[in-house]
Structure formats: structure tokens, C-alpha cells
Image: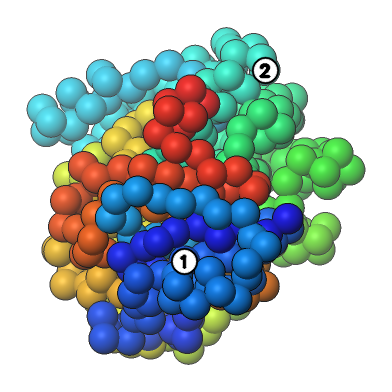
Amino acid sequence: MQYLIGPFQQVITMAGLSLRGPLSDEQLEIVSLAGIVVENDTIVEAGNFDRLMNSYPEAQLELLKGEYVAFPSMIDVHTHCCWAGSRAGDYAARTGGKSYLEIAATGGGIMDTVRKTRAATKEELAELTLERANTLFARGITTIEIKSGYGLSVDEELKLLEAIQKAGLLSPADLIPTCLAAHTIPTGFRGDERAYLHLMRTELLPEIKKRGLADRVDIFIEKGAFSVKAAREYLLKAKELGFDVVVHGDQFSSGTAKLAVELEAVSIDHLEAADEGEIAILAKGNVIPVALPGASLGLGEPFAPARKLLDAGTSLVIASDWNPGSAPMGNLVAQASILGMAQKLSMAEVWAALTFRAAAALGLSDRGRLEPGMKADFIIYSTNDYREVLYRQGELIPSYVFKNNILYNRALLNKI
């Protein structure tokens, strides 16, 4: 069945924009007084509403009363939404002057969440993950990457990935799992990163592949976590097993861009500490930089050099890093708006970073633009000016979400 949805004051298609480099708002394709035709969960056409009414007389009309703007749905490529417990104590310690690494060294940080997450059942974790995923969906984020990484043993990491899988069967959002067993070195392996990674790559990764629990592997390269040398060996094995690889890199210190480019990682995420040399390396490769402003806000650290990355010719994605420790906010639009102002990003650059460029960072080519043949996956805001969404810095939420051939209004979204 065909549907004609509209009319919209504006449809922001994101058509014709490049995957890399700077973008100006003048490059945005904005279709005024528009409608969107959908068939079999696929966009047939976005264009003038009156013309579409005449061209598709058999389409079922979904008439919107009021003034609305439509965008491609947002994609969050970096979250840690599968966890139990709280780290409010860590946050208080940071506001009191302690650093992220100091807190971790005294038993807080990631290992605090590991203890609480290990104590939760798979069913409890699936319920918590589902709740967070549905919260994001109601905000217009319909594709969500979710990492494991709070298990740090073979059995516990499998438990987390199974919980993510279960949540994915129940949520209207598309959940993309990533194995982050290499999140930090757990108690019992301190001082022996190679032994821990050997266990993960020989016992965990083959089992994940066998069970079809994830197609992506991530590692945190940093002081107190894993070295570049150990990460290379681990990621090479992951690629050999058929996984796509991504890297937590340059968060507190630089030096991971070369490895990410060498191994053809899909993305390198964080980059708060990336210097001119790292940016130059990334500009020569195809690795997609992912900025995580939520971590900068949660830790009181500088933002990733998004402006410099774009001007050097790289791509740029913005993700929330929603986690219980360093990025507890989870509000992607608020974070992207703040980063955009701080780094002087155009609205076109911010929306590209949340839509089709984000899709590329997950290896997805079927979403992120409102063009014929793409998935009918879009969000609708009650406004007559697309600029209002970022201007209001997360306060304006979608009135409708179209996903899986369903037009969710606020009443339905509030019930998810």
C-alpha cells in the first residue's frame, strides 16, 4: 500500500550532500509545502504536496494538521545503553576535582559499573536496554548502536550481547550491537593486557560470530586501558574472523589515528585529544571520525576538534556516548547543538553528522536521506522552520516518528 504523508512546511532531504568535508546550509535541499510518498517501507518520492496528490491518487492519505518539518530519522552510532546501576558518585567526585583516570584507579569508573552489571540478570539488562532504546526512539533516534563492555569475561559479555539482542526484538528502533569486551582490563588480568585479549579473541569472538550476536568489535586504546600494540593484534584477529572494527581513540591522549587508518576501521570515536598530526592522518584515510560531546560535557573536557576535522576533509559524525559514567545525559540533539555552537558547525554539518554520515559509520547505505529507494525512516517536528530544532537545543522533540510503516504520534511514542 502507498501512503502520502503531509503536508510539510519543509522536508529536509539531505540529498546530494558529500560524505566528507565542510557543508554549508545553502547546500541543503529543502522542499517546501511538501509531502512524502511511501510504499513497502520505502520512500517513493518527496516533493510538492499538491503535485503528489495528483500523481498518486490511490495513496492512503495521512493528513497532518498544523505546521511541520520532516527530517531523516537520527542515528546514534556510539552508546553503552546496556548497563545496570548508577555512577552518580563518580560524577560528584569529578565536580569535586578528581579526574576520570584518578577515579578509575581507586575502584570507580568502568569497573564500578561492571560489578553492578554482572549482578544483574540477562532479563533485567534487556529490560533496562529496551527502556533506554525506546527513550531514544521517542526523541527521533531510530537506529541505535549499543556496546557490550560491562561484562569483561566470556560469559558476562555474552550475557550483555544476548540482552541487547532481546531488547532489539522488542523495540521499534533498530539496535546495532558492538562487542566492546576490550573496554578496560578487568581485575585478575591487571598488568597483562595480552592475556586478557588472547582470551577474548580465542574464546569470545568466535562464539559471538557463531551465535550471530554482533558484527562489530571495538577497543578502548588509552592509558589504563589497552595499548596500540595490543589493540593491533586483537583487531587483526577480529577482522580475520569477519568483524568490522572500530576504535575508542584519542580521548585523553593522542596516537591512535595511524592504527585506525592502517586497519581500515569503520570509525574512530572520541578524538578529544586529537592534534594536528592525528587530523592529517585521518584526512588521508577513510576512517570516519565520531565526536562524542556528551563525554566532554560529562567529564568537563575539551570537545573533539570537529571544525578542524571537517576543514581537513574528513567526514564527521556526532553520537551521544550514553553511558552511566562519563556521558550520563543521553540527549543527542542537545549535545549536537552545543557542539555545533562551540565548534562553529553549520546546521547542514550537524544534521549530516546525525543522519547519512552516521549511517555510513555503521556501514548502512539504506537510510539517512529522504530519497527514492531509501528506507521510509523519518521524523516530524511541529515547527515551520527546520532551524528551530537545533536552536532549541534538545527542548523540541518530534511530534511524529515514521518507522516500519507505522506513523507514531506522541500518544503512541509515550506508550512505547
**Which is nearer the eye, 211 or 396?**
396
Q: Secondary structure at mark 1?
A: strand
Q: Are marks 2 and 1 in contact (CB under 8 Å)?
A: no
Q: Earlier in the sequence, mark 2 or mark 1?
A: 1
Q: Find disc 2 in the rendering and name its residue.
A: 122
Q: Dot 2 surroundings within 10 Å: few (below 14), some, or many (20 or more)?
A: many
Q: Is residue 388 left or right of residue 22?
A: left
Q: Position of residue 92 (x, y in %)?
A: 18, 23
- The image's mark for residue 407 is none
Observer able to see residue 187: no
Quadrant location of residue 272? bottom left
Who's the residue at 67% across and 62% down the image?
Answer: 58
Who's the residue at 31% across and 43% down the image?
Answer: 397
Q: Is residue 389 left or right of residue 149?
A: left
Q: Secondary structure at mark 2?
A: helix
Who's the residue at 38% across and 29% down the image?
Answer: 324
Residue 189 to residue 261: above or below = above
Which amino acid type is shown beneath numbered disc 1?
Gly
Residue 256 to residue 220: above or below = below
Which amino acid type is shown beneath numbered disc 2?
Lys
Q: Position of residue 8 (x, y in %)?
A: 37, 62
Residue most extreme to the right: 210
Q: Is residue 207 left or right of residue 118?
A: right
Q: Dot 1 surroundings within 10 Å: few (below 14), some, or many (20 or more)?
A: many
**Which is nearer the eye, 42 or 356?**
42
Q: Find disc 1 in the rendering and name its residue.
A: 35
Observer able to see residue 200: yes
